[in-house]
Image (cartoon, grey):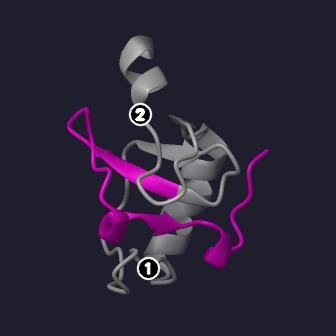
Amino acid sequence: MDRKLLDLLACPTTRQPLRPIDMRMLHDLNAAIATGGVKRGDGSPQSSPVDAALVTADGRIAYRVDDGIPVLLAEESLDLSAVGITAA
């Protein structure tokens, strides 16, 4: 993702800056999705694995990146802290 674009993006809920998810967190996220433990901001389960994501500065919320496009909708957010995923 273009660095200039990334510098402009922020979490729609907390207004924190976003950064690309690291490989360890992505692995942990997809493992939690496989067990059915990840919920979206609207309460629905995230059933498909994530190829890429952006994470808030505190590492608590992630947003999918689908085909290079960040899905920055509060109802599509993924609560990492609820499944015990923490920033490195």
Left or right of residue 81, residue 49 in this image = left
The residue depicted at 30 percent of the width and 59 percent of the height is 73
State the image coordinates of residue 10 (x, y, percent, origin top left). 46, 41
In the rendered image, residue 61, in percent from the top left (x then y), is placed at 55, 59
Q: Earlier in the sequence, mark 2 or mark 1?
A: 2
Number of marks: 2
Q: Residue at x 66, y 43 (%)?
A: 57
Nearer the observer, disc 2 or disc 1? 2
| Few, some or many residues within 10 Å of mark 2 (<14, 14–19, 20+) | some
Q: Which residue is mark 2?
A: 9
Helix, strand or loop at label 1? It is loop
Residue beneath disc 1:
39
Above or below 1: residue 86: below
Q: Quadrant of residue 5?
A: top left
Is residue 61 located in the magenta-colored stretch of the structure? Answer: no
Q: Which residues are magenta?
A: 62-88
Tag 1: amino acid: Lys
Residue 64 percent coordinates (x, y): 36, 51
Q: Residue at x 64, y 76 (%)?
A: 83
Q: Position of residue 50 (x, y in %)?
A: 37, 54
